[in-house]
Image: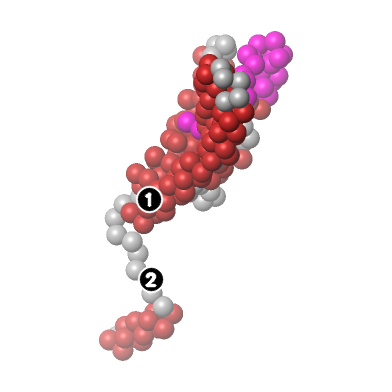
Amino acid sequence: MNQEEFIKKLRDRLEIFEESVIDEEVNYYLEQIEKQKDQNLEEEQIIASFGDLDTIQKNIFKKHGINPSKVLKKEGFIYKKFEELFQVIHRVVDSMSKNSFQENLKILFDLLILIVFICLLKIPFILVRNLGDSLFAYVSIPLISEIWGIIIDLVYIVVAVMVFVNIFTKWFKNLKVNKKIKGKALDSISLEDSKQEKNEKSKNI
């Protein structure tokens, strides 16, 4: 998560406070980010060191004498998972816009592997469905076989989505975003070259 995303999400979570209080809390974190940037730390690393937004939000509420459990809405497991997924997708897109072709090729290859794995995951579900169909064939009620097929398909979709979300977020959560460097890169110079350059200058003098 970059600075802009972090500040936006933090402001959204503090919307119950007056604007002056929100500004105070936001400015505190902006100052912390700027201080640690001076120590040559990456923006994403600094923000990650603050902890998750849930903890930050609760600590701010407690600081201002508000009981978080009475104010904050309970967010379900699925909601949090998909929120994390969308954050990681944004990170992947941001990274691909700044990375080289080779680095993007690796990301696409990883995605292809994940998609193939999800497809292979359907094999046991197909076997279970066929087993059920063969058993229900003796009952001679086509409707039961159809319902069985729908149930198996729905279970596969749920399992496939959850597996994809979990693996995708774990693989790409810490994806490095390269920063574009403006201007020409500095050419490296060896110690021997440096000595020769000094000797040439001294001779000219």
Q: Is residue 40 visible?
A: yes
Q: Which residue type does callout 2 highlight?
A: Ser
Q: Which mark is residue 43?
A: none
Point 55% across, 22% down: residue: 145
Point 41% across, 44% down: residue: 95
Q: Position of residue 32 (x, y in %)?
A: 57, 37
Q: Nearer the viewer, mark 2 or mark 1?
A: 1
> Which residue bears the numbered disc 1?
104
For label 1, the crowd category at 10 Å Cα-Cα, with few meaning under 14, some 14 to 19 and many 20 or more, is: some
| Residue 190 or residue 50, whichever sits in front | 50
Quadrant showing the C terminus: bottom left
Q: Which mark is residue 188?
A: 2
For residue 124, what is the image quadrant? top right
Q: Is residue 198 above or below residue 177?
A: below
| Residue 19 or residue 79, whichever sits in front | 79
**SS of the residue at dot 1?**
helix
The answer to whether mark 2 and mark 1 are in CB contact below 8 A is no
| Residue 173 or residue 5, whichever sits in front | 173
- Determine whether, in the image, residue 55 is placed left or right of residue 83: right
Point 27% across, 86% down: residue: 204
**SS of the residue at dot 2?**
loop
Going by the picture, which residue comes out furthest to the bottom? 203
Q: Position of residue 113 (x, y in %)?
A: 47, 49
Magenta residue check for 80: yes
Q: Is residue 151 visible?
A: no
Q: Is residue 73 above or below residue 46?
A: above
Q: Which residues are magenta?
A: 58-86
Q: Which residue type does callout 1 highlight?
A: Asn
